[in-house]
């Protein structure tokens, strides 16, 4: 049998998470009077940031100066109170500040939570 080095294609973490949430669109941030709750991933640490911003894509760029491997993966146009509820819900998974160690089950819960809250507020 032959041994050697194999090139193994892996799924890009950012692309996977953006497709998972299926709500990433940098072109829709034109209303600067709206508030967004967003998720960003640090691809080096896999930590997820839950935050709020009027322009999440701009917030992603400002974070690049501190952590160049941060990428916006999801955003919801909604009240910033939902961000506080998410931080309260996942406080035991806090790593530092707004950065959390979340797994796919947590991300699925967040997706369902956000869809339910946003649909019920309309």
Image (cartoon, rainbow, N blue to C red):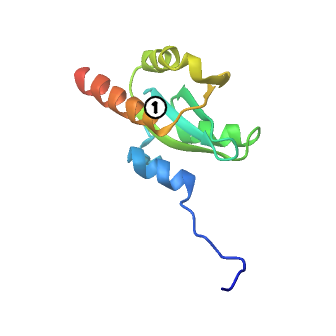
Which image quarter is the N terminus in? bottom right
- Residue at 38% over, 25% down: 78
Residue displayed at 47% across by 20% down: 86
The residue lying at 54 percent from left, 32 percent from top is 102
> Which residue is nearer to you in this view: 36 or 100?
100
Q: Is residue 62 above or below residue 5?
A: above
Label 1, secondary structure: give it: helix
Q: Is residue 52 left or right of residue 114?
A: right
Up-down relation of residue 17 to residue 117 (above or below) = below
Using a 10 Å C-alpha cutoff, classify the residue at mark 1 as few (fewer than 14 neighbours), some (14 to 19) or many (20 or more). Answer: few
Residue 19, given in percent of the width and then of the height, sits at: 42, 52
In the rendered image, is residue 122 in sight?
Answer: no
Percent of width and height locating residue 116: 28, 26
The answer to whether any part of residue 40 appears in the image is: yes
Question: Which picture quadrant has residue 111?
Answer: top left
Residue 94, how many percent across, how many down?
A: 62, 22
**Residue furthest front in the image:** 1
Position of the C terminus, as image quadrant, is top left
Image quadrant of residue 59?
top right
Residue visible at 46% across and 31% down in the picture: 106
**On the rendered structure, is 117 left or right of 86?**
left
Residue ID for mark 1: 106
Outermost residue toward the right?
66
Spot occupied by residue 110 in the image (x, y as percentages of width and height): 41, 30
């Amino acid at each position: 049998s032959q041994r050697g080095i194999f090139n193994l294609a892996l799924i890009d973490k950012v692309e996977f998470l953006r497709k998972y949430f299926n709500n990433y669109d940098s072109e829709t941030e034109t209303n600067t009077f709206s508030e967004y709750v967003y998720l960003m991933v640090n691809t080096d640490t896999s930590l997820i940031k839950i935050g709020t911003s009027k322009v999440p894509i701009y917030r992603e760029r400002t974070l690049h100066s501190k952590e160049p491997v941060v990428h916006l993966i999801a955003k919801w146009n909604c009240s910033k109170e939902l961000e506080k509820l998410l931080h309260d819900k996942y406080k035991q998974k806090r790593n530092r500040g707004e950065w959390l160690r979340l797994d796919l089950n947590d991300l699925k819960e967040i997706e369902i939570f956000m869809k339910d809250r946003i649909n019920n507020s309309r």
